[in-house]
Amino acid sequence: MISQLLEILGIIFIIVIPLFIYGIKNPEKVDKWSALFSRLFAWTSHKRAKKYIAKDIQSKINSFSKAINKKMAGVMPYPIQIQWVDTMDKATFLSNGEVIVKMNLHSNQDKNINFC
């Protein structure tokens, strides 16, 4: 009984640890999978829809910046993070090694990406 439990835990450990390491090395991929998962539930609330849109934009821009940095190091050294605002006081600033982009939500996804 205990040996079977240890065997199952070992299998889980063998699967989870490489996925965890991959996620640490590729945070933009985690954002993309998070966006895909959030998209499934985006219809349930406005908050989930905003989370999906933010993660989708973040994953696209961060993947692009990672590809650019492979060719020309230092061009886009920081990942971005989206924060939603309701007022017109939008700003972009650097915090904890991330570019924080504050923006309004638009119903058109292309406008969200353009204003980012």
Image (spheres, rainbow, N blue to C red):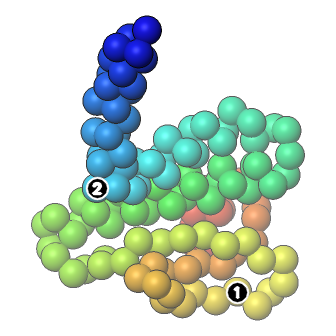
Which residue is drawn at the image coordinates 81% and 38% (left, top)? 43
> Which mark is drawn over residue 90?
1
Q: Position of residue 54 (x, y in %)?
A: 62, 59
Looking at the rendered image, the quarter that the C terminus falls into is: bottom right
Q: Nearer the viewer, mark 2 or mark 1?
A: 2
In this view of the protein, can residue 8 be seen by the observer?
A: no
Which residue is drawn at the image coordinates 50% and 87% (left, top)? 95
Looking at the rendered image, the quarter that the N terminus falls into is: top left
Q: Identify the residue under disc 2.
A: 25
Q: Closer to the N terminus: mark 2 or mark 1?
A: 2
The picture quadrant where one finds residue 8 is top left
Q: Nearer the viewer, residue 33 or 109?
A: 33
Is 24 drawn above or below residue 18 in the view shown?
Answer: below
Which residue is drawn at the image coordinates 40% and 62% (left, top)? 62
Is 54 drawn above or below residue 88 in the view shown?
Answer: above
Q: Determine whether, in the image, residue 29 is placed left or right of residue 18.
A: right
In this view of the protein, can residue 23 be seen by the observer?
A: yes
Identity, as a three-letter code, of the amino acid under mark 2: Lys
Helix, strand or loop at label 1? It is loop
Identity, as a three-letter code, of the amino acid under mark 1: Lys
Q: Position of residue 55 (x, y in %)?
A: 57, 55
Alpha-carbon neighbours of circle 2 within 10 Å: few (<14), some, or many (≥20)?
A: few
Which residue is drawn at the image coordinates 34% and 14% (left, top)? 3
Separation of residues labelled 2 and 1 (CA atoms): 31 Å
Q: Determine whether, in the image, residue 65 is placed left or right of residue 34.
A: left
Q: Nearer the viewer, residue 24 or 70?
A: 24
Helix, strand or loop at label 2? It is helix
Q: Nearer the viewer, residue 79 or 90?
A: 79
Q: Position of residue 106 (x, y in %)?
A: 76, 61
